[in-house]
Amino acid sequence: MVDLATVLSANLPAAIAWAEAQSQLVLNTGAPLTESGVADAKAVGVAQPERIRVLVVPHMPLPDDAALRAIALDTGLLGPDAIGLTLGHTIFIVEGHESRQLLTHECRHVHQYETAGSIAAFLPVYFQQLVTVGYYDAPFEVDAREHEID
Ligand SMILES: [Zn+2]
């Protein structure tokens, strides 16, 4: 079996570059939060909710690069069950899953990115959590679930 941690560290710069490019895409094409969305984002700790852009997509974006795609699927980040993805101030939501609960969950991830300072600073910590305790128990995921608003 391939060691995910090893594969990850070798591909981390490429993963960050992909995430930054995807984020840029959503900054240019996504929608800003509604007024109530801004209020919810503030409630879960987002400092700059006006910067957030949301893009509803038919399915999650997947990297073209085979190694990156394998990482995305093996970590569960972009697997078939993935319905939301936050990269910096940008949020992908899979069509049909738009909800206040999911949006506040993803906004809490925005707060985590703001605290880390950048996508390049956040992702290594997040990946480290994923490979050590798994997606569900990753501290960033636990924290996001605790801040969901129904
Ligand atoms: Zn999450």
Image: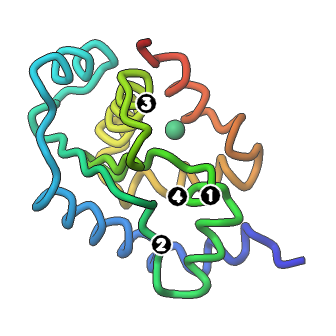
C-alpha span from label 4 to label 3: 23 Å
Count neighbours of disc 3 (C-alpha within 10 A) and say few if under 14, some if 14 to 19, many if 20 or more.
many
Please identify, in this view, whether the residue under mark 4 or under mark 2 is nearer the observer. Answer: 2
Which element type, helix, strand or loop, lies under badge 3? helix
Q: Residue 67, position in %: x, y?
A: 61, 83
Secondary structure type for disc 1: loop
Q: Residues within 10 Å of mark 1 (few under 14, many from 20)?
A: few
Q: Earlier in the sequence, mark 4 or mark 1?
A: 1
Q: Could you tell me how far apart the alpha carbons at marks 4 and 1 are, in whole angstroms?
A: 23 Å
Callout 3 amino acid: Leu
> In which quarter of the view is residue 137 placed?
top right
- Residue at figure coordinates x 45%, y 79% from the top left: 14
Choose mark 4 or mark 3, whichever is in front: 3
Q: Quadrant of the N terminus?
A: bottom right
- Amino acid type at mark 1: Pro
**Residue indicated by mark 2:** 62
Q: Are marks 4 and 3 in contact (CB under 8 Å)?
A: no
Residue highlighted by disc 3: 102
Q: Amino acid at mark 4?
A: Pro
